[in-house]
Image: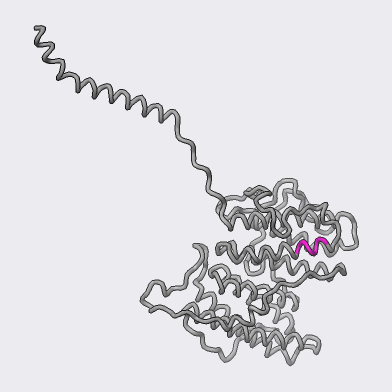
Amino acid sequence: MKDRRQDSSPRMRPFRFAVLGLAVLVVLSLGFALNPAEKPAPAPPSFSERARAAAFSEAMDLRAAGLELASAGAAESTALEPVVTLLTIQARALSVPASDSGPASASPSLSPSAVAGRPGAGLSGAGLQTPAALVQALANSGTARVEDAETADGGMARLLAGTGTAQLLAAGRLAAATGVPAPKGPAGTQEEASAAEATAAACPSPSDPAAAPKTTGPDAAASVGQALAAVITAEQQAAYGYQAALPRLAPAEAGPASEFLLRHKEQAAAAAEHLRSACGAPLPQQPGYVLEPGFLAAPASGLGKLEAATVAAYGDVIAVSQGQDRRWALSALQSAAGRAQRWGADPGPVPGLRLDVDQLPSLPAGAALPARDGAPQSPAAP
């Protein structure tokens, strides 16, 4: 019997080792489960989100400065009210993070240090105690927004471009109303004039998937080619309207109208060149367009509506394009918004973007809204 136990012992050793190894494996797995690995650090915010947060922060600071100046009882308070209203709407539009599709918290997702170093960054009401300072800060912020729109993703690029354009226009209006020096206007006329000189790249065959114009994001409503085609139509219709309006305008308005007519013809040609570069089919020149009833009786008002239509068309190009096409559209958007304002049309709080103000989120609690008809509104008002 003793010899049999000795003979069976070597055969049991592998089984014992296997059981022991399994027990060790179970213990280790339980240890890993009880001590999970540390979560990886969150990815840094995208450029579009950083640009949005900077725009929101500066709009809130500019708005606070405008409210402070208006509440001081200065003679410029009447001129400041529309500026504060504009900044209020823009802040509400900018309050939703770029990646947030749900209800907005109306607070920037970045710390103030993340937006430091930008023109106008770190503004405070205490530092903008005069209309002249506010005018310059508005111009600085508007310029920064337009510059960021060159790089941001499609939909955010359009929002930033419209925000910056409206702030630049507001700076000019406030300067004129308060008698302070006007800020330097937005550059871009030279790029508009030379845009038609761009060289078109060779277009691939229609069967090649690369032949389709590229969009910059899933929210793009149309391809680059479709958006450029819409610009051509809007520019040609505007030129037709100016030709019909010129004989009926007062002498003081006929001069600017003649210059604007030339600009629209140039822009239609430039848009056609960009369309060719995007491998789009050329559009035939229409013999004429149907003008709104009453256009000839009030041509200035009708021209303002035609200019507003070109603003919307350029906003679409910005949202779906990139590179040279977008830079050209950014410049054209600013010029078109300025012409619309010249004829008394309102380009909106975000030119180039159709906003439903009633659907925008409210500002954070404690951010008082501007007064209307002399009565201050509740901070919780939409």
Q: Quadrant of the N terminus?
A: top left
Tell me which residue sits at (84%, 62%) in the image: 131
- Main secondary structure along the magenta-highlighted residues: helix
In the picture, measured across the screen, residue 91 lies left or right of residue 222, that is: right
Which residues, given as a range, are shown in magenta? 133-138
Residue 135 inside the magenta-drawn segment: yes
Closer-to-camera residue (361/17): 17
The image quadrant of residue 77 is: bottom right
Residue 371 image position (x, y, % from top left): 81, 56
Tell me which residue sits at (55%, 50%) in the image: 44
Tell me which residue sits at (71%, 86%) in the image: 259
Residue 48 image position (x, y, % from top left): 58, 58
Residue 171 image position (x, y, % from top left): 78, 67
In the picture, measured across the screen, residue 277 lies left or right of residue 33, that is: right
In the picture, measured across the screen, residue 351 lies left or right of residue 21, that is: right
Tell me which residue sits at (75%, 77%) in the image: 342
